[in-house]
Image (cartoon, rainbow, N blue to C red):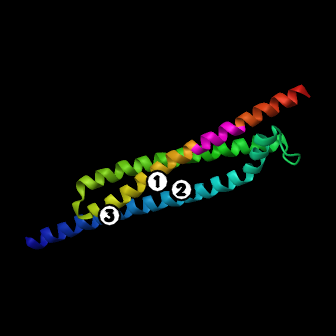
Amino acid sequence: MFGFFRNLRKKISSSRYQEISDYKESCDELVGKYEHLLKQISEYMQENQVVLRSFEQNGRLLPQAPSDQVQLNTFSLLSIKDELVQITSECESLLSRGSSHLNTNTAYEKTIEVLLSQLRELRRYSEQIEEALGEFEDKLLKMEEVLSEHSLCN
């Protein structure tokens, strides 16, 4: 009889461990996606910073920066923002999933608490990045507006 309960407890413990392990793996995958997105954002901003800085200082584009490239860069920004929204949504889902694990798995509470803390920080970074991308987009849109007005005059 005791063997039955011991085996049952091992099975339950094993399945709980697997759930937590899967959850941790999902969190790690999300962090990987986030790191990849940060690299994309960095490259994107570096590519466009010179054009934007020149435009802000002189009110016009550099000769080697055609307006088609600016529109393409705006599209890239929208793609990056969309990916950030998806990552943020995944983060919210994992936060919710982790909170439910925290309530049912006292043996793994510390692990879940650490993962939830990391996800909350990731969520906070997402908000900051979203704000910075919004400001960057505003600058690009203003530049495109001026370019459109300028090309219509010609």
Rounded to the nearest angstrom, the CA distance separating label 1 from label 3 is: 17 Å
Instruction: State the SS at label 3.
Output: helix
Q: In this view, does 73 lie to the left or right of 152?
A: left
Label 1 neighbour load within 10 Å: few <14, some 14-19, many 20+:
some
> To which residue does mark 2 refer?
34
Locate the N terminus and report the quarter of the image it occupies. Answer: bottom left
Q: Which of 63 and 72 is in front in this view?
A: 63
Residue under the image location 21 percent in, 70 percent down: 10
Badge 2: how crowded within 10 Å, few (<14), some, or many (20+)?
many
Query: In percent of the image, x 34 and y 53: which residue is there?
Result: 98
Q: Is residue 146 above or below residue 27?
A: above
Is 135 part of what is drawn in magenta? yes
**Amino acid type assigned to the residue bearing label 3 in the image:** Thr
Q: Do the residues labelled 1 and 3 touch (CB within 8 Å)?
A: no
- Residue 58 position in % (x across, y down): 82, 40
Q: Nearer the N terminus, badge 2 or badge 1?
A: 2
Across and down, in percent, residue 154 comes to 92, 28
- For the point 32% across and 63% down, which residue is it? 111
- Region rendered in magenta: 132-140
Identify the element where label 2 is drawn: helix
Sequence-first tag of 2 and 3:
2
Q: Where is residue 115 in the image (x, y as percent from the top left)?
A: 37, 59
> Is there CB contact under 8 Å for labels 2 and 1?
yes
Residue, disc 3: 111
Question: Which amino acid lies under the numbered mark 1 shown in the image of this protein?
Answer: Leu
Rendered image: mark on residue 145: none
**Residue 10 on the magenta segment:** no
The numbered mark at residue 122 is 1
Front-lying residue, 3 or 44: 44
Whether residue 153 appears in this view of the structure is: yes
